[in-house]
Image (cartoon, rainbow, N blue to C red):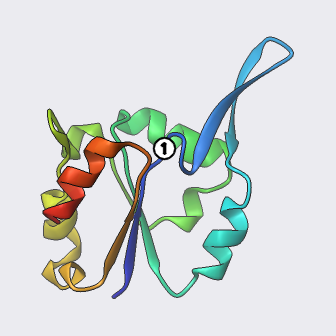
Amino acid sequence: MKIICWDLDDTLIADEIENGVLTTKTRPGIQELLANLKDYTHVVTTAAQPEYAEKALTETGLKNSFARVFAADKINHICGKLYRPVIETLGREILREKTVIKDYPVHERSASGF
């Protein structure tokens, strides 16, 4: 199983203000990229709360592109994201074939131990 772990905010989606209203939009090219990577299993790893993550993915039409969402309640840590819950849920075989797409330098430290 080939898995890509995606960060949510500022990677998959971004907030924009339009006519004084805050909206959540899919980052340019994400829909096409996900379509081109259809042979992979995609999961979201986010520091956001689960309710926010689910709502944002639903509103942007991305929800069905992801097998699972690992949110703050499962993976947040003072030093970044913990990927142990991802491994325990999806199986240790993902250690051989994984990619982490992130937007913040602290995630690199936590992803390197993944």
- The quarter of the image holding the N terminus is bottom left
Q: Residue furthest right?
A: 19
Seen at 80% across and 11% down, the residue is 20
- Front-lying residue, 99 or 86: 99
Q: Residue furthest top?
A: 20
Q: Which residue appears at 37% of the width and 77% of the height? A: 3
The image shows residue 13 at horizontal and vertical percentages of 60, 44
Q: Position of residue 96 (x, y in %)?
A: 22, 85
Secondary structure under the numbered disc 1 in the rendered image: helix
Specify the amino acid type for callout 1.
Glu
**The C terminus lies in which quarter of the figure?**
bottom left
Whether 110 is drawn above or below 10: the answer is below
Q: Nearer the viewer, residue 2 or 64?
A: 2
Q: Residue at x 15, y 38 (%)?
A: 79
Identify residue for label 1.
Answer: 54
Q: Is residue 28 left or right of residue 10?
A: right
Locate residue 73, reporting x and y percent: 23, 38
Residue 59 placement: quadrant: top right
Vertical side of 111 occupied by 54: above or below: above
* The image quarter in which residue 29 lies: bottom right
